[in-house]
């Protein structure tokens, strides 16, 4: 299955590359300037044109696409019902549970290019070559060719079906760990100092702070107090 998907991906990338080379004669594929702002503006147009659903694919990104991926993650968070969002990524963005909600984020085991696909009709394809070159080896196109976008959409449906749903902050945790996380969150919400909280929980301050760091990252919280508030909003903590 994985080998087949990789073959489809290679075929699609090859097809998009061929279209890009002759884009002056082919109005259904438009090259995008590789400035981060230009790529994100093109992605926003693709998403705004969606009526039914949007796939956003964020593979593992090096420095050359880090800013683009951060912008696409923000753009994905603005996809609201009735449009369906399916976010495929190598690693969930910080705070994904709060920003996207359950069921909208999955971890893709198959390597994919950076993609935004709307309704199976329009796509933004962004890739980085290993040999560098012009624009740092980056290239992007907006594609409306039905055969290319249709192949992309079919591939993404297949990958989504086999991808692993992202785990929530406490999903899959053993009961003891889940209880510890809840107790840490209660103390963050109540503004308890690290030293006092560690004493109450019978752990070292260092261990307590490791829990805090992990919780802030999972929830995408900007402060300890905000983490406690978000935990209440997400139903991890009961209302006081």
Image (cartoon, helix red, strand yellow):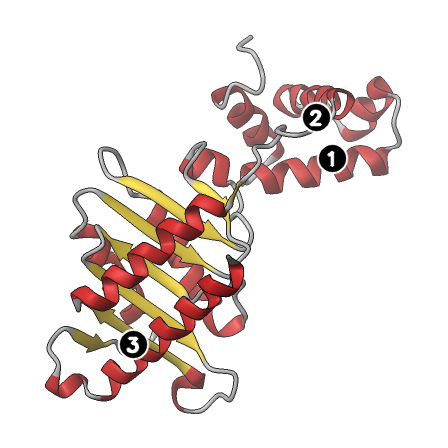
Does residue 177 sit above or below 59 in this rendering? above
In which image quadrant can residue 203 be found?
Answer: top right
**Res. 4 in view:** yes
* Residue annotated with mark 2: 181
* Residue annotated with mark 1: 211
Residue 147 appears at what percent x and percent y?
A: 20, 67
Does residue 76 sit above or below 221 in this rendering? below
Precedes in sequence: disc 2 or disc 3: 3
In this rendering, which labeled residue sits more in front, label 3 or label 1? 3
**For numbered disc 3, what is the local secondary structure?**
helix
Q: Give the alpha-carbon distance from disc 3 to disc 1, as whole Å.
A: 45 Å
**For numbered disc 2, what is the local secondary structure?**
helix
Residue 70 appears at what percent x and percent y?
A: 44, 58
**For numbered disc 1, what is the local secondary structure?**
helix
Residue 198 appears at what percent x and percent y?
A: 83, 26
Q: Give the alpha-carbon distance from disc 1 to disc 2, as whole Å.
A: 7 Å
Answer whether labels 1 and 2 touch (C-beta < 8 Å). yes
Given residues 190 and 163, the one toward you in this image is 163
Res. 219 mark: none
Residue depicted at 28% across the width and 84% down the height: 18
In which image quadrant can residue 23 be found?
Answer: bottom left
- Extreme-top residue of the structure: 240
Res. 16 mark: 3
From the viewer's perspective, is 34 left or right of 113?
Answer: left
Mark 3, Cα crowd under 10 Å, few <14 / some 14-19 / many 20+, is many
Residue depicted at 66% across the width and 19% down the height: 186
Q: Give the alpha-carbon distance from disc 2 to disc 3, as whole Å.
A: 46 Å
Precedes in sequence: disc 1 or disc 2: 2
């Amino acid at each position: 299955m994985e080998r087949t998907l990789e073959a489809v991906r290679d075929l699609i990338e090859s097809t998009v590359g061929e279209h890009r080379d002759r884009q002056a004669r082919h109005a259904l594929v438009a090259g995008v300037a590789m400035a981060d702002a230009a790529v994100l503006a093109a992605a926003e147009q693709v998403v705004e044109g969606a009526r039914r659903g949007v796939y956003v694919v964020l593979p593992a990104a090096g420095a050359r696409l880090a800013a683009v991926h951060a912008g696409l993650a923000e753009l994905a968070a603005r996809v609201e019902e009735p449009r369906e969002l399916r976010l495929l990524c190598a690693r969930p963005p910080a705070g994904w549970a709060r920003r996207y909600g359950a069921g909208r984020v999955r971890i893709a085991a198959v390597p994919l290019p950076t993609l935004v696909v709307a309704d199976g009709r329009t796509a933004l394809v962004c890739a980085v070559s290993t040999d560098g070159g012009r624009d740092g080896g980056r290239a992007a196109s907006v594609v409306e060719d039905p055969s290319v976008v249709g192949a992309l959409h079919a591939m993404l449906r297949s990958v989504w079906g086999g991808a692993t749903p992202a785990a929530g902050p406490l999903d899959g945790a053993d009961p003891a760990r889940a209880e510890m996380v809840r107790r840490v969150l209660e103390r963050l919400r109540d503004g308890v100092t690290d030293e006092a909280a560690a004493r109450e929980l019978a752990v070292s301050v260092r261990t307590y702070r490791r829990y805090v760091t992990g919780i802030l990252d999972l929830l995408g919280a900007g402060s300890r107090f905000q983490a406690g508030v978000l935990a209440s909003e997400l139903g991890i903590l009961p209302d006081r």
